[in-house]
Image: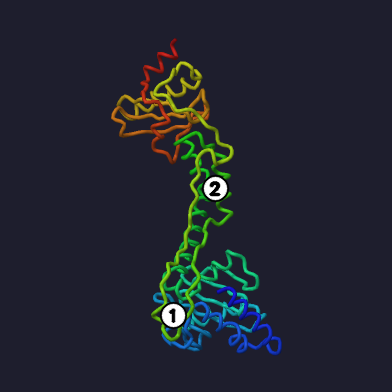
Amino acid sequence: MWEKIETIIQRADNNLNRSMTEERTKQFLIEPILMTLGWDLTNPDVVQREYKQVVDYALFGKQVTIFLEAKRLGSHLDSAMQQVLQYAIEKDIKPDFVLTTDGIQWNCVSMRYRSPLFSVNLRNPSKEEKQLFLLLSKDSVDKGALTNYANMIRTEEEVLSYLKQHASQIASEIHAYDSIFEEQTIIDYIEHLANQSLITIKVEEPAPLSLEQPSSTTEKAKKVTAPWTSHTASSIPGTRSTSSWVTTYDISALDRQYLQLVAQRIAEMQKQVGEPLFVRFGITGNWDTPNYQVETASGRHTWTFHGRGRQQKPFRGARRFNPNKITAERYSLEDILKVLRS
């Protein structure tokens, strides 16, 4: 297909050198490329020119309508996009996507999200640009590839925006769940994600358009994938490994001032709750002042706290810690007082 597009561009260059009008741009560039993409310009159910006096072409997929505004080769396309959007709004026509092109530069906007999706230049396009351009083929549009791509772009933007806004809270919760992940490393990684696109595109080339036997074209799967890479602890810089956590450990080895603060907190909470409380210590936080979880005898109610000596404070996000990263044995207030008295 790309050899054919290159031939179309070369032929257009030879003809348009004499007169680069809009009509000749349509004749020698835009319409041949649309045909190559599988859009049957002879079928009014698929393509209509001068649609409702709003746009140069309306392309009708199975469930998607695309408006295409054509300009002469070398034109600035920003004003063309604004023109189409304004006309569509004035006449209350709602296409799913809007394209503007001078035959070489193709810009695509999602009307649902009111945001640009991509811009492709057909002179020496990169591999990614080729994949993006193939989203405009009739087969891809009919199979939902263009719509899926728009949805994934929007989803990625919203997810990454949320991650960035709540980076500190998310880092705190992950660190509480497993201390192998350092909070600042998590924040840095979220910032890294927010500054790049994770979406990759995989679309097969459209089958050649057959005007004689349009129904005989073999359907091929067109798909857009967004493989979100999973990361293990060792793949994130700055994390530290640790051995498996043991079921119990000697709490007498913990910092005494820290234990005193824990005991005071449990005593205060017991008065408020009205029943005995227990504590499990974890491997998160400093090693001699670990984070800890206070809970009722039934374990139905839990409170999680940062360890950090005099800086103890509740975790706002985590209701309970990873059970594999805290002691299986629960320590009562009396157990802690025994250590303090020894």
Secondary structure beneath dot 2 equals helix
The circle on residue 98 is none
Judging depth in this view, the residue of 11 and 81 nearest the camera is 11
Dividing the image into 4 quarters, which one contains the C terminus?
A: top left
Judging depth in this view, the residue of 177 and 102 nearest the camera is 102
Residue receiving disc 1: 60
Which amino acid type is shown beneath numbered disc 1?
Phe
Is residue 126 positioned above or below 1 on the image?
above
The circle on residue 190 is 2
Tell me the residue at 37%/26% (across/down).
328
What's the colour scheme?
A: rainbow
Tell me the residue at 46%/20% (across/down).
259
Judging depth in this view, the residue of 206 and 256 nearest the camera is 206
How many numbered markers are drawn? 2
Secondary structure beneath dot 1 equals strand
Judging depth in this view, the residue of 38 and 249 nearest the camera is 38
How far from the left and from the top, in percent, is residue 15? 67, 87
Dividing the image into 4 quarters, which one contains the N terminus?
A: bottom right
Which amino acid type is shown beneath numbered disc 2?
Ile
Is residue 218 positioned above or below 304 on the image?
below
Q: Earlier in the sequence, mark 2 or mark 1?
A: 1
Tell me the residue at 55%/36% (across/down).
239
CA separation in Å, label 2 and label 1: 40 Å
How far from the left and from the top, in percent, is residue 305? 45, 32
Is residue 144 positioned above or below 322 on the image?
below
Tell me the residue at 63%/79% (across/down).
9
Quarter of the rendering containing residue 46: bottom left
Residue 296 left/right relative to 74: left
Quarter of the rendering containing residue 20: bottom right
Q: Residue furthest right?
A: 18
How far from the left and from the top, in percent, is residue 162? 49, 52
User: Badge 2 local density, few (<14 within 10 Å), some, or many (20+)?
Assistant: many
